[in-house]
Image (cartoon, rainbow, N blue to C red):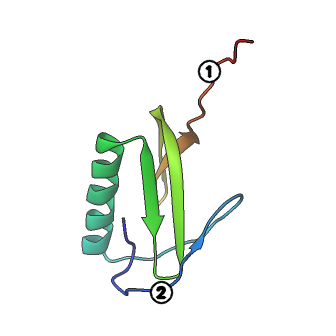
Amino acid sequence: MKMDKKDGGNKRVIEGRFEEEVHMTRKETAEFLRNLADEIEESNEIKITTNEWELPFKIRNDVEVEIELEGDELEIELEFERYTDKKLKLE
């Protein structure tokens, strides 16, 4: 899912630790969340992209949702854990 409308050339693929804060309009946020919901429902891999980078992430079936209201700020946090294939090798 794209977080902006600009079409970029080569994107760097994000691996390891990464953090970025993005400000969007309500309409852009709604579109982002709809696209994220579609990806979660259709597959166990989400991919967030901008014109500069791409962040692919294979997710587990369970998602942690934290809702916090503090003063005038409502925070909704989604936490996805990475899916790992834990099949044992038999020799």
| Residue at image coords 55%, 72% | 21
Amino acid found under the numbered disc labelled 2: Gly
Mark 2 neighbour class, 10 Å CA radius: few under 14, some 14 to 19, many 20 or more? few
Disc 1: which residue: 87
Location of residue 31 in the rendering, given as x and y in whole percent from the top left corner: 26, 66
Amino acid found under the numbered disc labelled 1: Lys
- Direction from residue 52 to residue 87 in the image, left or right: right
**Marker count (numbered):** 2
| Residue at image coords 33%, 50% | 39
Could you tell me which quadrant the C terminus lies in?
top right
Q: Secondary structure at mark 2?
A: loop
Mark 1 neighbour class, 10 Å CA radius: few under 14, some 14 to 19, many 20 or more? few
Residue 73 in sight here: no
Quarter holding residue 88? top right
| Residue located farthest toward the right when viewing the structure as drawn | 91
Give yes or no for contact between labels 1 and 2 (Cβ–Cβ under 8 Å). Answer: no
Q: Separation of disc 1 and disc 2 at Cα?
A: 38 Å
First in residue order: circle 1 vs circle 2: 2
Disc 2: which residue: 9
Q: Secondary structure at mark 1?
A: loop
Q: Is residue 70 above or below residue 51?
A: above
